[in-house]
Amino acid sequence: MSFEVFFRILLGIKTVILLQVRLGLKQTSNKYPEWLDLLLQSKFFMPCLNLKHEELRRGEINVFCIDCKACLCQHCFATPMHSGHKQLQIRRYMYRDVVKIDDMQKLMNCSHVMPYTLNSAKVVLLNPRPQATKPPTKSNETGPNCMRCERMLVGLNRYCSISCKVKHNQI
Ligand SMILES: *[C@@H]1O[C@H](CO)[C@@H](O)[C@H](O)[C@H]1NC(C)=O
Ligand SMILES: *[C@@H]1O[C@H](CO)[C@@H](O)[C@H](O)[C@H]1NC(C)=O
């Protein structure tokens, strides 16, 4: 084998390795789908101003259309434009936005996120509760803390909210 042929083979291997590294990086950053990012940044429970839906019963924004990545009220979601689309209903628990685990589990694995009980259904917080002024100090006497934001948890849970699970696993 001439030196030139050997050198080209070496160069080829290097290209393949570089390509694999790039693809690998791309895959990790795609782990967190865009709809989930938008869902976690959205505000819910404002009146729906579309077609005066705010005047109807349940005319507040409490549906997230996964296909359109949009926040809607139930009346908007019921229009033919969204027929067959996947949706997630947002609920309120102690003034925070929550989703039923049964609904969310179809879209992502909710295990280890701290559950709450709302009307006999298990729900999880979308985002962490507001933090008290100083962050809690990690202590071995106070039970487990959220893997991302260190808020106190109970039981065998590792995350306080969907957001903390998604963002912790992302890093
Ligand atoms: C969800 O994640 C947990 C822990 O990572 C795993 O044990 C479980 O099998 C997963 N469930 C599903 C439905 O993928
Ligand atoms: C907490 O940790 C400290 C130092 O690591 C140890 O001395 C103490 O016994 C621990 N307390 C408990 C309740 O485990």
Image (cartoon, helix red, strand yellow):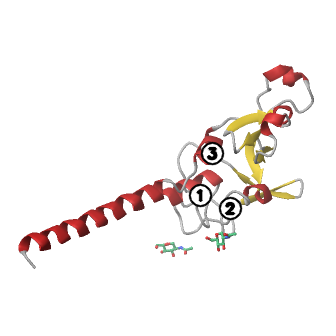
Residue placed at 76% from the left, 29% from the top? 46
- Distance from disc 2 to disc 3, alpha carbons, whole Å, reads 16 Å
Could you say which disc has been placed on residue 35 in the image? 3
x, y percentage for residue 170?
50, 57
Q: Which of pointers 1 and 3 indicates the residue nearer the eye? A: 3
Label 3: few (<14), some (14–19) or many (≥20) C-alpha neighbours in 10 Å = some
Q: Is the residue 23 above or below the residue 3 in the image?
A: above
Q: Nearer the viewer, residue 61 or 67?
A: 67
Residue that lies at the very extreme toward the left in this rendered image: 3
x, y percentage for residue 24?
41, 62
Residue placed at 66% from the left, 40% from the top? 69
Q: Is mark 2 within 8 Å of ligand 1?
A: yes
Quickly name the residue at label 1. 165
Could you say which disc has been placed on residue 38 in the image? none
Secondary structure category for the residue under label 3: helix
x, y percentage for residue 119?
89, 53
Q: Which of pointers 2 and 3 indicates the residue nearer the eye? A: 3
Query: Which quadrant holds residue 140?
Result: bottom right
**Quarter of the picture for ligand 1?**
bottom right
Q: Is the residue 145 above or below the residue 69 in the image?
A: below
Quickly name the residue at label 2. 110
- Distance from disc 1 to disc 2, alpha carbons, whole Å, reads 8 Å
Amino acid type of disc 3?
Trp
Amino acid type of disc 1?
Lys
The answer to whether marks 1 and 2 mark residues whose Cβ atoms lie closer than 8 Å is yes
